[in-house]
Amino acid sequence: MTDLMEAFADCPSLGHRVRTVLDALPEYVQRDLLDDPRFSISLENFVPGKGWTLWMACPGPHGSSSRSVVLRPRLAECSLEFAHYVIAHEFAHAYLRNGGWGEIEDVEEAADALAASWGFCRT
């Protein structure tokens, strides 16, 4: 877990928000994410006129793909409720491997529904 949180060394308030959401997820979801070497969390490093850099795992065997969550620094400054929702939504995408959930096939709706089931509703 400590390695994952290093991305927020320069933005500790966002790191705290990420940790709060991660700690609130069901244990089986935490284990699924944290025990997967393809899972990563990073802070977007966009620079106008230069772009941004993102390192992620290459696709693996049997279609296994990277499970990267990239968060924008402004999540440290917006309302706590909204930041928690966005973070949970992105964790839901990673958990669902950017797929559907139950009967919900649309990936955005699935991530919203799963985040809401964890207590993080879209506002």
Image: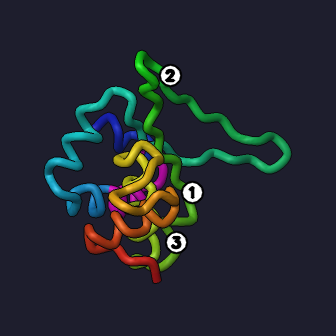
Q: Secondary structure at mark 3?
A: loop
Nearer to us in this view, 107 or 47: 107
| Residue position marked by numbered label 1 in the rendering | 72
Q: Quadrant of residue 21?
A: bottom left
| Residue position marked by numbered label 3 in the rendering | 77
Compute the Cα span from label 3 to label 2.
34 Å
Q: Secondary structure at mark 1?
A: loop
Q: Residues within 10 Å of mark 2 (few under 14, many from 20)?
A: few
Query: What amino acid is at disc 2?
Result: Pro
Q: Name the residue at the front extreme.
A: 103
Left or right, residue 115 beside residue 107: left
Q: Is residue 17 in the magenta section?
A: yes
Left or right, residue 44 beside residue 112: right
| Residue position marked by numbered label 2 in the rendering | 59
Compute the Cα span from label 2 to label 1.
24 Å
- In the image, which residues are magenta? 9-18
Residue 43 — which label?
A: none
Nearer to us in this view, 62 or 45: 62
Q: Nearer the viewer, mark 3 or mark 1?
A: 1
Query: What amino acid is at disc 3?
Result: Glu
- At 36% from the left and 57% from the top, the residue drawn is 101
Query: What amino acid is at disc 1?
Result: Arg
